Image (cartoon, rainbow, N blue to C red):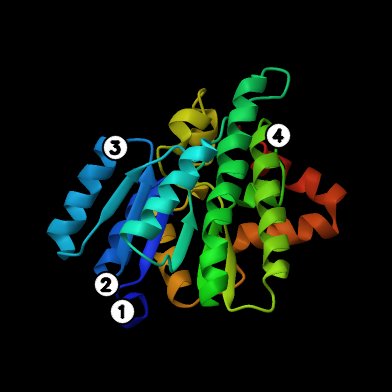
Amino acid sequence: MEKKLLNKNIVITGASSGIGEKVAILSAELGARPILLARSTEKLKEICEIIKQKTEKECIYYTLDVSDFEQVKAVFNKIYEEVGQIDILLNNAGFGIFESLQEANIDEIRRMFEVNVLGLIACTKEVIPSMLDNNSGHIINIASQAGKVGSAKSSGYSATKHAVLGFTNSLRLELFQTNIIISAVNPGPIETNFFSIADKSGNYLKNAKKFMLKSDFVAEQIVKLMIHPKRELNLPKWMNTASIFYHIFPGFLDKLLGKIFNMK
């Protein structure tokens, strides 16, 4: 198991906290070389120090706002020049804001699209040429169960995650005849600092606490996905089953699952 990630260069966006941070540490423990990208230089530096102390593995970081597309191009050029081939790209950067549309700020919705969708696309675009040259690579996009089933007070966020899934599925078809693997990760709510921004009222966090996934578990599953790639990773399974039934019986499920999907 460890050998499959040994000396692999894994680029992780949104690596300064939460799932990105935990995946970086876990992958380094399995012999990978994590390359961390996020806006907070100090946090990235701290995480790299933790990784070096725990694993004695080289950890590299670059400051990056994925919504700055010129910066994306410059940083990925640096990675190829200074580190070399990128074996795995984990597009993890993203955020959400849960508000009804009439109360939502259009600038915040635009910012979600810039980070969650266009930033993800920009980073992916930078690794495709090299992966095609090598006819290998793995791109993992963090989407969401919200990209499969919308819910009240998340129209903007849910729209970004629907876009991520649409992009991921289309890209997979574009690269169908190559050895480049395209995966989507669709988690339900996770216990991270995501909700400090997304859930300003605190109501969703309180109501959905019992349904929330542990961040350690999600990170472990993502690392397993790197080792044993597949098309989609859906967490938890029951929520994905609900999304499947939702598309078959949307009217019925609107009523049955309304309370669960509208806790915000």
Residue 219 in which image quadrant: bottom left
Question: Mark 1 or mark 2, which is nearer the start of the sequence?
Answer: 1
Cα–Cα gap, marks 2 and 1? 7 Å
Q: Earlier in the sequence, mark 3 or mark 1?
A: 1
Look at mark 3 in the image and give the residue it sits on. 41
Crowding at mark 2 (Cα within 10 Å: few <14, some 14-19, many 20+): many
Residue 13 appears in the rendering: no
Q: Left or right: where does residue 67 sit relative to residue 40?
A: right
Q: Image height check: is 153 above or below 3? A: above
- Picture coordinates of residue 30, whole percent (x, y): 28, 72
Residue 155 numbered tag: 4
> Which of the 4 image quarters holds residue 244?
bottom right
Q: Mark 3: which secondary structure?
A: helix
Please name the residue shown 54% across and 39% down the image: 69
Query: Which residue type does callout 1 highlight?
Result: Glu
Please report contact status of discs 4 and 3: CB closer than 8 Å, yes or no: no
**x and y percentages locating residue 84 in the rendered image:** 36, 65
Which is closer to the viewer, label 4 or label 3? Answer: 3
- The residue wearing badge 2 is 31
Q: Nearer the viewer, mark 2 or mark 4?
A: 2
What's the residue at 49%, 35% (across, down)? 205
The residue under label 1 is 2
**Label whose residue precedes the other's in the sequence (2 or 4):** 2
Disc 4 on helix, strand or loop?
Answer: helix
Which residue is most to the front?
81
Are discs 2 and 1 less than 8 Å apart at CB? yes
